[in-house]
Image (cartoon, rainbow, N blue to C red):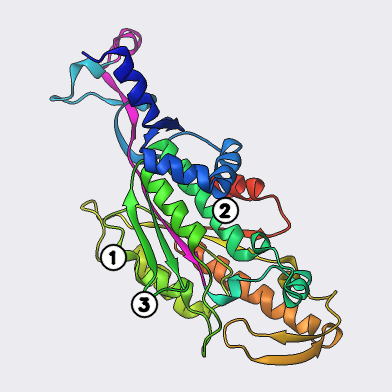
Amino acid sequence: MVQPDEQRGRRRRGRRVGGGLLRRETVEALDRSPDLHIVARTYAEGIYQGRHRTRDRGSSTEFYDYRAYTPGDPTQLIDWKLYGRTDRLYIRRFHQESQLTILLIVDGSASMQFGGFEWARRAAQNDVDLNATKFRRACELAATVAYLGARQGDRVGLLLSGVESATDRPVAVPPGAGWNTFHELLTVLGTSRPRMPKSGPGTALTDGFLHADHLIRGSGLIIGIGDGLEQPEPLMDAMSRARYGASRGVSGRAREISFLHVLTDDELDISGLGGARLVDSETGIQVRTHSDAVGGGYRERLDAHCRQLATGVMSLNGRYQMCALSENPVDQLRRFLS
């Protein structure tokens, strides 16, 4: 039997967050760096929609439909009132709640460390807000989805591809359920920075999808979050491999693929740029130009690029959502999840 003093001691060693009991070291870490956690929780409160369901039928409390009784079916599922009206035996079917495995692939390439032209001007003067970049928004979106998953009891993992690390491999958090895995994921997001410019075009999302099989086994949901400034053909091929990879579940069902496309407003429309010196974030190559000279062609090529990504994702029966930095991320996630 637990005495009152022992009970108080046990309460001091943990805290309930979102319905789960966190370890003491997790609570202390959240107290030291609560920002990303608070953002995720705040965003999630407006978009939480309940547990995921599989397409399978099973035992739960939510009725789905009827089917004719066959010998061997559980008799407790027979709807006797319907039998009284129709003189035929039918059994009730219910949705089956299941634990979903979610893998978040976040783009950590150099181009993600950008927040627009005004942001770049301030960065040149060492007056820059790191919370106003594409990478920060991608981290906030990933943290919110992870919060929703932890709250629903799902297994959530992370592949942070392209960030500064000791190896060229993505930084990974294996999928797991519970608030401690959620905190580990937040720690990785909060302490990582996009990679400095290198000698070639960005391939972070492509690399991340190619590594998906190392973390997610069987069916599940894979969500890419990034600016998509990569060659679309290799990226689509990597998404297809992740969806139809050899490591599918015993049911043989393909995984689901989704993409949150994060871009600044200045990348979507350069009409207000005027004359400028543009620097490629991935290669460091510089060029001087004027928006009046290149604006029309730029917009056409960007629109075509975005359409190719959206069409490619939807051809995999996935979801695509444009996430401009000026828009409300809660509205973006609500549209994405609805």
Q: Tag 2 or tag 3, which sits nearer the N-term? A: 2
- Name the quadrant of the N terminus: top left
Q: CA distance from mark 3 to mark 1?
A: 16 Å
Res. 64 visible in picture = yes
| Image quadrant in which you'd find residue 302 | bottom right
The disc placed on residue 214 is 1
Q: Tag 1 or tag 3, which sits nearer the N-term? A: 3
Q: How many marks?
A: 3
Q: Amino acid at mark 2?
A: Glu
Which of pointers 2 and 1 indicates the residue nearer the eye?
2
Q: CA distance from mark 3 to mark 2?
A: 25 Å
Q: Please state the horizontal and vertical placement of residue 192, each as a whole percent of the image.
A: 49, 65
Mark 1 surroundings: few (<14), some (14-19) or many (≥20) residues within 10 A: few
| Image quadrant in which you'd find residue 89 | top left
Q: Tag 1 or tag 2, which sits nearer the N-term? A: 2
The residue under the point 29% across, 10% down is 80
In the rendered structure, the answer to whether residue 76 lies left or right of residue 305 reads left
Within the magenta stretch, is there residue 105? yes
Q: CA distance from mark 2 to mark 1?
A: 24 Å
